[in-house]
Amino acid sequence: QAQLAESGGGLVQAGGSLRLSCAASGRTFSDYTMGWFRQAPGKEREYVAAIRRRNGATYYADSVKGRFTISNDNAKNTVYLQMNSLGPEDTAVYYCAAKYSSGGYGSVYQYDYWGQGTQVTVSS
């Protein structure tokens, strides 16, 4: 059974950095698009970034562009989210997700697999 497992969350001061990891198991997801989403308390889950594993194309939400970097290691079947210049507005539970590669990537409804999430808290 395909599973996604996030790790790397934690507490960091404003201006700091964290790197999240999403380890995939049960299948390779080689033809999939992998996405990162986040959900703050009382808010809807929102798109953060996505990467197409087939060709490495990356996409970002405007709110994180220039600060976050999504990357992929096919050999480890793992996707990463490097987060720099973090601010309190980035505090949320971060989720990894996977969908078959074709089509859009910015909606939660487009994804077939989800991890359990990892908490990121940025103190001011």
Image: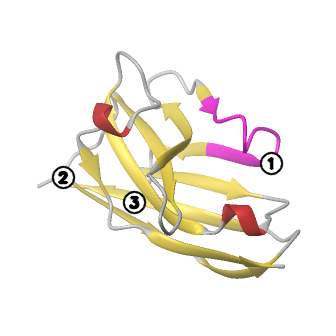
Mark 2 is on which residue type?
Ala
The reply to whether residue 98 is in sight is yes
Q: CA distance from mark 3 to mark 1?
A: 22 Å
Q: Is residue 3 left or right of residue 53?
A: left
Instruction: Give the quadrant of residue 122.
Output: bottom right
The image quadrant where one finds the N terminus is bottom left
Q: CA distance from mark 1 to mark 2?
A: 30 Å
Instruction: Give the residue at mark 2.
Output: 2
| Local SS, label 1 | loop
Which residue lies most toward the front here?
42
- For label 3, the crowd category at 10 Å Cα-Cα, with few meaning under 14, some 14 to 19 and many 20 or more, is some
The reply to whether residue 8 is in sight is no
| Local SS, label 3 | strand
> From what the image shows, is residue 76 above or below residue 123?
above
User: Which x, y percent locates residue 58?
Assistant: 61, 29
Q: Earlier in the sequence, mark 3 or mark 1?
A: 3
Extent of the magenta region: 59-70
Labelled disc at residue 23: 3
Residue visible at 72% across and 58% down? Answer: 83
